[in-house]
């Protein structure tokens, strides 16, 4: 799978860990930045990830920050993006299964590293369940 990833400074450490994890699973990963934990303005790294996923250049996208809230908001503003703010594996499973989330947002300050990696794994492995959820998603006017 082709996966885009980006973070601000507050999500940088987990972004690097997740890139290694994804590569180890055989996924193709493109890092949209940032490249350190020096303070940056998060939209300049998050929006390009969402735009690339929306254009179909990547199948999925992962964005990270301190809480993940602002990153999810930036991503969700892009037409065609369904970004789930995840705080545990169950929220990732439901985001995929019920909402067909093509992006997730994680908060480095909100969880241990092991939880973040487990969230990513669950989100990648969970299929969209379709059915009534699919009809509802098609009706949403982004």
Image (cartoon, rainbow, N blue to C red):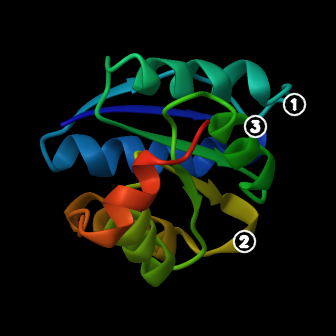
Q: Is residue 34 visible?
A: no
| Mark toward the viewer: 1 or 2 | 2
Side (left or right) of 17 relative to 56: right
Q: CA distance from mark 1 to mark 2?
A: 18 Å
Side (left or right) of 74 relative to 127: right
**In the rendered image, the vertical position of residue 106 relative to residue 3, given as above or below:** below
- For residue 86, which numbered disc appears in the image? none
Secondary structure of the residue carrying numbered label 1: loop
Q: Quadrant of the C terminus?
A: top right
- For residue 9, which numbered disc appears in the image? 3
Q: Position of residue 45 (x, y in %)?
A: 67, 23
Q: CA distance from mark 3 to mark 1?
A: 5 Å
Please name the residue shown 24% across and 64% down the image: 130
Please name the residue shown 65% across and 24% down the image: 47
Among numbered discs 3 and 1, the one appearing first in the sequence: 3
- For residue 110, which numbered disc appears in the image? 2
Label count reads 3
Residue that mark 1 sits on: 39
Among numbered discs 3 and 2, the one appearing first in the sequence: 3
Front one among 9 and 135: 135
């Amino acid at each position: 799978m082709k996966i885009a990833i980006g973070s601000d400074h507050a999500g940088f450490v987990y972004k690097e860990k997740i890139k290694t994890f994804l590569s180890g699973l055989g996924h193709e990963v493109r890092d949209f930045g940032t490249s350190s934990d020096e303070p940056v303005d998060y939209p300049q790294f998050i929006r390009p990830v969402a735009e690339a996923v929306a254009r179909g250049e990547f199948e999925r996208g992962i964005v990270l920050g301190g809480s993940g809230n602002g990153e999810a908001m930036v991503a969700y503003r892009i037409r065609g993006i369904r970004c789930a703010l995840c705080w545990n594996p169950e929220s990732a499973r439901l985001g995929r299964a019920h909402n067909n989330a093509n992006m997730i947002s994680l908060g480095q300050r909100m969880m241990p590293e092991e939880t973040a990696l487990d969230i990513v794994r669950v989100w990648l492995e969970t299929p969209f369940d379709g059915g009534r959820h699919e009809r509802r998603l098609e009706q949403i006017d982004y």
